[in-house]
Every structure is written in C-alpha cells, then in structure tokens.
Amino acid sequence: MSADIFVTGGSGFVGAATVRYLSNAGYWVRALSRSEASDRAIRAAGGEPVRGDLESVSGTHLAGCEAVVHAAAHVRAWGRWRDFRRVNVAGTARLLAVAREAGVRRFIHIGTEAALFHGQPMCDIAEDDLPLALRSPYPYARTKAEAERLVRAADDPVRGFRTIVLRPRMIWGPGDRTLLPALAQMVETGRFAWVDHGRAATSTTHIDNLTRAIALALEHGEGGSVFFITDGETVTLRDFLSRLAASIGLTLPDRSVPGGWLRTIAFVVEPTWRFLAPEREPPITRMVAAMLACPCTLRIDRARSELGYRPVVSVEEGLARLRQSAIRSARVPNPEGAGAG
C-alpha cells in the first residue's frame, strides 16, 4: 500500500520502529520532530521529519495524510502532574482535533495496560474486564486513561474518522532505551532487588509484534475499539528479566524484598520526596512498587480475531536475537568463539 502516515514520537523506541516498519511496507511516513537529532533518527528509519511538537502540531503537518500513529507520550515513573497532562492528555486532544479537521481517516493510539491500573493485580484479563483508571493515584496511568477515553470518544463513523487503541505491555527488543538500560543501571549502582523473588506473572510485547499490530490496525479493526497486544506468552518477571539481562551479559543478583514492604516504603517515601526534592526521582515510587508486585497477564483473543494479529516473534526468538546482536557488537563474549579459527 502507498499512503501517507503521520507518526508522533518518531525518534523514540516505539515511534522509530514504527517509522521503519511502515516505510519498509511501502507507506510514505512523516514524523513529528523537535530537534535536529530527532530529524536524523527519523531519516535513518526511513521517514520524513517535520518540525513541531504536540503543542504546535497543525493541519499543515498532516496535510494529505490518511492515518496517524500516535506513539508520543510522557512515560515516567516520576514527575509533575501538569507535565503528564500537557503531553498525554492535552497533546492527544489537540492531535485528535487537528487530525479530524485535516481529513485523516484512521487514528491509531499507542495506549498501555497501565490505563487500567490503580495498584491491583490484573490476571488473564480481556480488554473490557476493567474500567479505565480515571482515578488512579499514578500520574502516568491516570493521564493515559484520560487520553484513551478521548481517543475512543473521538471515533466518528459518520465523518469517516475512525480511532483504534492498542495496549501493549512491557515493550522490549532492539532499540529499547528504558527497560534494559534501567536494569543495567540498577545493577551497577547496587540498587537492584527482586520483589517477592520475581514470582509475578506478566505478559510482554516485543517491538516487532507491536509494529506488526500497528500495520494491521491501519487496515483492520472496528473504529472505537481497543486491543491488547502481547507476545502471546506468560512469563514470570524473574525468568524474563533474568534472560533479558543475560542477553547483554548482565547477571541479576538474587536479593529480594517483600512486595507489601516495598509498597509501604514507597507510600511513605514518595510524598516526602515530592515535598523535599520534587525535581529528583526517588529511589522507589508507588507505581513502580505496585507494578513489580502485581501480576499482569493479558488476553489477545480480540486482536487475533478482529485484526488478524499473530505474534511474529516469540520470547525465545527475541531473546536469542538480542544476544546475537550483543555478540556482534562485542558486548558479550561468543560462547562458540573460543578455539575457533
């Protein structure tokens, strides 16, 4: 297919992978860029950068585009409420309005399972099993819930403006700038510890599976729908994170703390920290403590049946690819290299 697609967050992990995938699939991709560095990243992925941000985006940026993939978000464990609202809520609202007026026909919003999260376990849930967490105590979760509500409400079949929400969980893979770097930093600084020995079960989403789902959502799916997107497997945090870390030659320590204890500590630390040092992230936040302590497994039956989605990369294959990439870049030793020659 040859069509113009507009992507936000195009120099980030998800956005850059989306630009690359869609460009390779034959789409003409434009991506919102805030800097020369972002321009270079977008061009390297095969897209055309257009300068602006979510506060200044206009119909000129989107002229001629048939679809929008909204991957930009303020993703933090810590920060000011107004910053989360400015990007995740106000930015989404503005982009929706501009897209509708520009004649865009499809709006794909990259949401998150965190939009349902207020500190509770989520086990084997389907998309409509829980309400949006519009009263979540966590800024990221609440503002992503508010953004999702805006996106779904904006679906307008009469005007031909259809919206889709995709909810991945724990996105990982090549290009990740969050999960693996955070693990490495915690290990290096001696701050890493398992919560309840890492027993919590979780779903995960390889970046290649997410970009495949995005491409499918551009063509399929009823407007106003929401879809969980995962690798289709359930793993424990300990098994997954240990193998993820091992892919770059990193060994995670065995130290563990009780989940209830950690959540209590975070409940005390966070408000104190916000009062004494609001510009610095505390060693633990309530949201991170809760997410590490609670299982989160998601069903993808709806994505399978309505989008035709099938994971294209298994957890095992994705981890093997990461390890091979690390070997090629000499970050970890090649176990088959000794004595070769």
Image (cartoon, rainbow, N blue to C red):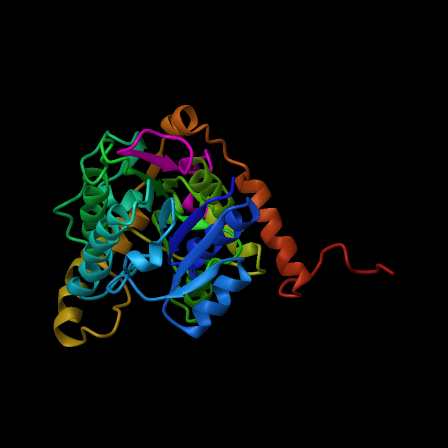
Q: Is residue 337 above or below residue 214?
A: below
Q: Residue furthest right?
A: 341
Q: Residue furthest top?
A: 305
Q: Nearer the viewer, residue 34 or 30?
A: 30
**Side of 121 where 33 appears, left or right:** right
Considering the image in quadrants, where does the C terminus appear? bottom right
Q: Does the stretch in magenta take in 198?
A: no
User: Where does the magenta region start and end?
Assistant: 217-238
**Side of 133 where 184 appears, left or right:** right
Q: Is residue 100 above or below residue 13?
A: above
Q: Note whether residue 28 is visible.
A: yes
Percent coordinates x, y for residue 149 in the rendering = 19, 42
Percent coordinates x, y for residue 295 in the rendering = 32, 40
Percent coordinates x, y for residue 61 in the rendering = 34, 59
Question: Which residue is depicted at the point 58% across and 60% down?
Answer: 249
The number of numbered badges drawn on the structure is: 0
Q: Note whether residue 119 is visible.
A: no
Question: Which residue is depicted at the point 21% across and 55% down?
Answer: 94
Q: Does the stretch in magenta take in 227?
A: yes
Q: Nearer the viewer, residue 27 or 90?
A: 27
Q: Nearer the viewer, residue 118 or 236?
A: 118
Occupied quadrant, residue 327: bottom right
Q: Is residue 255 above or below residue 25?
A: below
Percent coordinates x, y for residue 59 in the rendering = 29, 56
Question: Which residue is depicted at the point 54% across and 57% down?
Answer: 46
